[in-house]
Image (cartoon, rainbow, N blue to C red):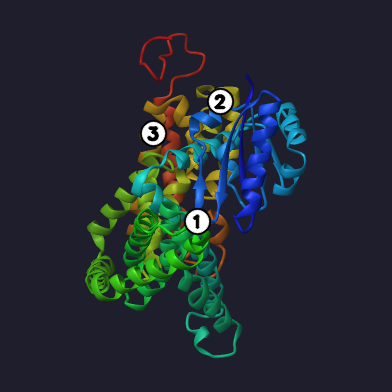
C-alpha cells in the first residue's frame, strides 16, 4: 500500500487545521492509501510524525497557512497547499502528491540534509536549548551588524543624539540585542510546550534582563516556562465548553506569573553573581590561557561539524556578545570556517586524493566555508572520517588559538567573510585573516598527507583500514 504523510495548520489553529486533516484522512481511506496527519493547532502539535513515518512515506502533503518546517522532509516529494484546498479537494491533492517526483540531491543539498537530520535527531534539553539558540541568532546577527555600522562613523559617534550612528546603535543595541534573551527563552519554552510556552518564556526572558541575569537567566527562564506549562496542561482540566480558554487565558496567565516570580525572587540574584564572575574571568584572560581557550573552541567547532559539541562552543560565544566579550566569537567563527575552506583547498593541491565528485564538491565548499557553514565539511568527513576529522580539527585548533593570541574581537556572530569589510565589525582584521588562512592551509596539508592517492592499487578503505 502506498503511504503519505501530511501536516495541517491554519493561522488560528482551531477549526480549519482539523477539518483539513479529516478531509485528507477520509479521501485517503477511499483511495486505499495509507496516511498519517500531524496537526499543528492552538494547543500544539498532535499526532506528530516520526522519522520512521517520514522515511516510509511515498510523498508529503503540507496543507498549511503557517510555517511547518519543510526541511524535515528533505528528499521527499512535497506538495504544499493551503488548508482550504485540502478541505475542498483532498483527493486531487493526494493524487498530485503521489505523482510528484522526489528531487535529486546536489552537494549543497547533501549538506542541508545533514543539518536537517542532526536537527531532527536532537532530543531532550539539548534540543530545546538549540531551538532557542537558532531563533536567537538572527537577532544577534542583525543587531551586531547594526552596531558595527554605527561604529563605522566612529567608536563614540552614537553618543550624539539625532545622528545616523545613534539611530543604528538604537536599532542594534536597543532593539535587536534587547530581544535576544526573550527570544532565546521564548523558543526554548516553545520547544518544550509548543505555542503555550511562548508567552511565559518570552516574559521570563525579559525579566531575566531586568534582574541582570543575562543569557544564563534566559536559558533558565525558558526551561522553567516550558515545563511549567506542561505541568499546568496535565493538572488543569476545564469543561469541554471552556477548553478554548486554556491556550489564550489560563496557561499564559498562570505560567507567566509563576516564571516571573521565580525569576525575581529565586533565580535572579544567584545567576547575576555567576554571570559577573564569569565575565570578569574572561575579560582578564590573556596570554597562554587565552590561546588555550581558542584552541579548545577550535577543536570543538571542527569535531562534529555542526553537531552538539560544535553548537555548545557557538552558544557559549554568542551568549557573551551582549556582555561585550567578543574575542571568543572571533575564534569560534574563524575555526568554523576553516574545515570547508581547508578541504576545498585540498581538492586543488591534491587532486589525485579525491574523486571527481569530491573535486566538484570542493568548488561549493569554498562558498560554504566563506559563509561560516561548517557543515560543508560533512560529505568529505562521511566518506573518510578517520583522515578528514583529525585534519579539520588540527586546522580549526590553529585558527582558534591564533585568533585569541592576536586578540581579535568580533561583534557579529555569523556571516563569514562577508561581514569582515564592515568598519569596526572586527578588530585586528589582518591578524584574523592570518589565523583563518593558517588554519585553512594546515587542514589542506594534513588531509593531503593522510589521504592515499585514488589510483593507488593498495589503497585502504577509510572506514575499515583494510585493503580495498
Closer to us: 321 or 32 = 32
Total labels drawn: 3
Residue named by callout 2: 56
Q: Secondary structure at mark 2?
A: helix
In the rendered view, would you say 438 is above or below 455?
A: below
Specify the quadrant that holds the N terminus: top right
Cα–Cα span, label 3 and label 2: 32 Å
Closer to us: 46 or 144 = 46
Residue named by callout 1: 240
Q: Kindly report which numbered mark, 3 or 2, lies closer to the viewer in this rendering.
A: 2
Residue 270: x and y in percent read 22, 70
Cα–Cα span, label 2 and label 1: 36 Å
Dot 2 or dot 1, earlier in sequence: 2
| Residue at image point 38% right, 46% down | 310
Per the rendering, the mark at residue 389 is 3
Check if mark 3's residue and mark 1's residue have beta carbons within 8 Å: no
Q: Is residue 423 visible?
A: yes
Closer to us: 185 or 290 = 185
| Residue at image point 68% right, 39% down | 23
- Mark 2: few/some/many CA within 10 Å (<14, 14-19, 20+): few
Q: Is residue 363 visible?
A: no
Amino acid at each position: 500500500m502506498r503511504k503519505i504523510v501530511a501536516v495541517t495548520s491554519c493561522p488560528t489553529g482551531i477549526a480549519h487545521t482539523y477539518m483539513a486533516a479529516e478531509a485528507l484522512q477520509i479521501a485517503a481511506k477511499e483511495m486505499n492509501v495509507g496516511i498519517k496527519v500531524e496537526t499543528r493547532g492552538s494547543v500544539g502539535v498532535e499526532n506528530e510524525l516520526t522519522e520512521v513515518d517520514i522515511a516510509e512515506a511515498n510523498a508529503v502533503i503540507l496543507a498549511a497557512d503557517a510555517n511547518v518546517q519543510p526541511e524535515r522532509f528533505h528528499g521527499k516529494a512535497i506538495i504544499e497547499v493551503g488548508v482550504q484546498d485540502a478541505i475542498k479537494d483532498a483527493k486531487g491533492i493526494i493524487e498530485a502528491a503521489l505523482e510528484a517526483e522526489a528531487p535529486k540531491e546536489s552537494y549543497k543539498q547533501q549538506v542541508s540534509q545533514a543539518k536537517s537530520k542532526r536537527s531532527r535527531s536532537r532530543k531532550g534539553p539539548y534540543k530545546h536549548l538549540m531551538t532557542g539558540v537558532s531563533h536567537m541568532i538572527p537577532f544577534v546577527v542583525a543587531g551586531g551588524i547594526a552596531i558595527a555600522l554605527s561604529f563605522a562613523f566612529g567608536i563614540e559617534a552614537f553618543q550624539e543624539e539625532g545622528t545616523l550612528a545613534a539611530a543604528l546603535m538604537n536599532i542594534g543595541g536597543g532593539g535587536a540585542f534587547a530581544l535576544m534573551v526573550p527570544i532565546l527563552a521564548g523558543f526554548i519554552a516553545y520547544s518544550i510546550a509548543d505555542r503555550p510556552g511562548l508567552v511565559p518564556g518570552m516574559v521570563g526572558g525579559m525579566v531575566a534582563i531586568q534582574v541582570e541575569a543575562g543569557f544564563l537567566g534566559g536559558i533558565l527562564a525558558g526551561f522553567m516556562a516550558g515545563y511549567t506549562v506542561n505541568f499546568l496542561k496535565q493538572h488543569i482540566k476545564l469543561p469541554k465548553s471552556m477548553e478554548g480558554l486554556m491556550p489564550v487565558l489560563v496557561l499564559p496567565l498562570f505560567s507567566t506569573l509563576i516564571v516571573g516570580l521565580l525569576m525575581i525572587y529565586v533565580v535572579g540574584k544567584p545567576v547575576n553573581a555567576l554571570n559577573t564572575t564569569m565575565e570578569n574571568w574572561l575579560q582578564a584572560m590573556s596570554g597562554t590561557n587565552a590561546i588555550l581557550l581558542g584552541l579548545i573552541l577550535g577543536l570543538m567547532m571542527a569535531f562534529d561539524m555542526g553537531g552538539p559539541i560544535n553548537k555548545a562552543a557557538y552558544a557559549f560565544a554568542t551568549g557573551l556578545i551582549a556582555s561585550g566579550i567578543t574575542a571568543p566569537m572571533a575564534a569560534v567563527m574563524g575555526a568554523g570556517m576553516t574545515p570547508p575552506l581547508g578541504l576545498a583547498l585540498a581538492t586543488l593541491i591534491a587532486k589525485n586524493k579525491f574523486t571527481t565528485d569530491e573535486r566538484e564538491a570542493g568548488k561549493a565548499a569554498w562558498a560554504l566555508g566563506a559563509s561560516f557553514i561548517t557543515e560543508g565539511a560533512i560529505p568529505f568527513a562521511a566518506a573518510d572520517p578517520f583522515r578528514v576529522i583529525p585534519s579539520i580539527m588540527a586546522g580549526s585548533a590553529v585558527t582558534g588559538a591564533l585568533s585569541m593570541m592576536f586578540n581579535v574581537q568580533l561583534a557579529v556572530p555569523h556571516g563569514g567573510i562577508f561581514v569582515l569589510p564592515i568598519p569596526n565589525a572586527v578588530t585586528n582584521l589582518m591578524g584574523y585573516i592570518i589565523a583563518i588562512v593558517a588554519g585553512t592551509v594546515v587542514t589542506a596539508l594534513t588531509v593531503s598527507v593522510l589521504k592515499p592517492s585514488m589510483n593507488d592499487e593498495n589503497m585502504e578503505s577509510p572506514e575499515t583500514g583494510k585493503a580495498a
